[in-house]
Image (cartoon, rainbow, N blue to C red):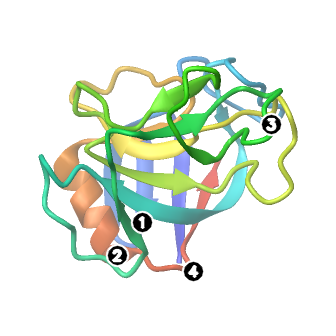
Amino acid sequence: MIIHVKNKHTLIIDDFELKCCIGKMGSKYNKKEGDYSTPIGQFSLGKLYYRQDREKKLETKITTRVIKKSMGWCNDPLNTYYNKEILINKKIKHEKLFRKDNLYDYLIVINYNIGKIKKDKGSAIFIHLTKNYKPTAGCVALKKKDFIILTKLINNKTKIKIF
């Protein structure tokens, strides 16, 4: 199964066409850290993370993980843990997964720049929540109801293709 993100506003999976938003600078092949673009290509999906204090565990066939206050995602290209989940450390540049807003109440990792990590090619590319479809820093975002539909349809073999 392949999820298609065919433009800035549409994600297609099976017979569902869902409204979405992507990076502020659109999508591009040569993504760089901090460029506000969503990477073009086909990628596998990683874990589904969720805030247990706010949301329930979703019905899904992919691996899930509870977000803890101490969790972050390294976005420092010079660090060994670049583009990986980390325990928050003030010495390491990171994105907090346990946020005050609701954007990361649910998120799915897009396995972009994950296997053989290239420094400065971009990090923390997720499918996460949105309330108002404002452009993201490079992720794909959906309304909560659509995110829940997506999680019911995907499995560990699902890919996402971003145009």
The earlier-in-sequence mark between 2 and 3 is 3
Disc 2 target residue: 153
66 over 112 or under it: above or below: below
Q: Position of residue 126 (x, y in %)?
A: 50, 45
Q: Secondary structure at mark 3?
A: loop
Q: Nearer the viewer, residue 107 or 84?
A: 84
Q: Nearer the viewer, residue 89 or 61?
A: 89
Disc 3 target residue: 29
34 over 6 or under it: above or below: above
Q: Position of residue 109 (x, y in %)?
A: 52, 53
CA distance separating discs 4 and 2: 11 Å
The kind of residue on which mark 4 rests is Lys
Marks 1/2 in contact by CB < 8 Å: the verdict is: yes
Q: Secondary structure at mark 1?
A: strand
Nearer to us: label 4 or label 3: 4
Q: Could you classify mark 3 by the number of other residues whose Cα lies within 10 Å: few (under 14), some (14-19), or many (20 or more)?
A: few
Disc 4 target residue: 157
The kind of residue on which mark 2 rests is Leu
Nearer to us: label 1 or label 4: 4
